[in-house]
Image (cartoon, rainbow, N blue to C red):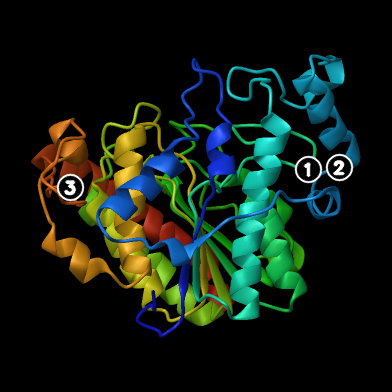
Amino acid sequence: MKTRGGQKAVFIHSAELEKYHYPTENPFRTERAAITCQMLTSMGLLSASEILAPAPAGREALERFHTPRYLDTILRAEKGDLDVSGLYMGLGSAECPVFVGMYEYAALACGATLAGADAVLSGAASVAFNPSGGYHHARPEKAAGFCYMNDIVLACMRLADASKRVLFLDIDVHHCDGVQDAFYDRNDIMTMSFHESGKTLFPGTGFENEIGVGSGRGYSINVPLPAGTYDGAYIKAFNAVAVPIAKAFDPDVIVLEIGMDCLAGDPLAHLELTNNAYAEVVEIVTAFGKPMLATGGGGYHPRNTSRGWALVWSIMSGRDKQAALDHGLGGVMLESTDWQGGLRDRVLAPSAQQQRTVDRCVDATIERVKANVFPFHGL
């Protein structure tokens, strides 16, 4: 399928990715990608020729960011050998449990995002989407937030190694602490995150004064949002901050992490978006006209998450008008996954009190971000 820019969009997935699952008591569901793929196929929004099956990332690729000691510890842990050093690395916690296949799954998810980066670099695709990616909390030697290996960092490094200026834009509800830290002193990879404030949500970072160090000063941008943030307030913040900075930075490639845990009713967070806000953000980013590598991320209501990813794929692949013909009501606003053939949620109007409270906080955040980082970019 050709996008509006005339290039091919690729959806990165395989039956191999469907083999692996976190323990049932863990809220992270790897099957969201398979649900998305099935949904898109059944609606005629994804063809077999657009699906790219990835290979696992090898040790050399993984060691571009992760330490050999850490990777070896994961391998030992999944075989039942978890020692104290592994516990200090975050393994065996409630959020990063040890399970059979965790190394293989993480390496395959990383390989999928790297395959997308390679497709963009080669010109084989202008848009690549890996819904099984987006593990933005993992550190070189630490697992956190359901993330064992950081596919985002690896992909940004690969793009930067090819002399590309990279804008990493994260719209997951959680701050991208692992990615930010990896590039905190660099100005060729800009990190920009819109997330629920660390005052109320894990990982407790991502405040307006976190702007980078050294040559990277001004190239880490954080927009923390209050609980209850609704579509209109979110889009206002995005237009006020992301659009002018992205235009000033003028990246060669955009890496977009599309965690769907900002959706109203997500069990692990407190924002109140519908998937229409995600659609509008992706429309704005697509209009920049840059090659784009997109990944999944959070989202702990699997069906609503998959519907949101299906919706943004329809936009990235140039099929949004076709998807709109099947518009129906349902999704998060009905507290149900039942809908009449459409992908979009119905509009949810905030209460007057919610609007006043949220708008006051968001306006103040926008002004702080402008004061902290706009001068670095001539804005």
Residue 165 visible in the snapshot = no
Dividing the picture into quadrants, the one containing residue 140 is top right
Query: The residue tagged with tag 2: helix, strand or loop?
Result: loop
Q: Which mark is residue 67?
A: 2
| Residue at (48% x, 73% y) in the render | 245
Residue tagged by mark 3? Answer: 345
Residue 359 position (above or below residue 197)? below
Category of crowding for the residue at label 3, using alpha-carbon neighbours closer than 10 angstroms: few (below 14), some (14–19), many (at least 20): many
The quarter of the image holding the N terminus is bottom left
Question: Is the residue under label 2 in contact with that under label 1 (CB below 8 Å)?
Answer: yes
- Residue 240 spot, x, y in % from top left: 35, 67
Which kind of residue does numbered mark 3 sit on? Asp
Q: Is residue 133 left or right of residue 80?
A: left
In terms of sequence position, does the residue under pointer 3 or pointer 2 come before the other? 2
Question: Is the residue under label 3 in contact with that under label 1 (CB below 8 Å)?
Answer: no
Q: Which mark is residue 359?
A: none
Residue 67 position (above or below residue 156)? above
In terms of sequence position, does the residue under pointer 1 or pointer 3 come before the other? 1
Q: Is residue 340 left or right of residue 287?
A: left
Residue closest to the eye, 55 or 283: 55
Residue 145 position (above or below residue 131)? above
Residue tagged by mark 1? Answer: 140
Which kind of residue does numbered mark 2 sit on? Thr
How much space separates mark 3 and mark 2, taking CA atoms?
A: 43 Å
Residue closest to the eye, 244 or 151: 151
Query: The residue tagged with tag 1: helix, strand or loop?
Result: loop
Q: Is residue 287 left or right of residue 348?
A: right
Residue at the extreme bottom? 6
Which kind of residue does numbered mark 1 sit on? Pro
The mark lying in front, picked from 1 and 3, is 3
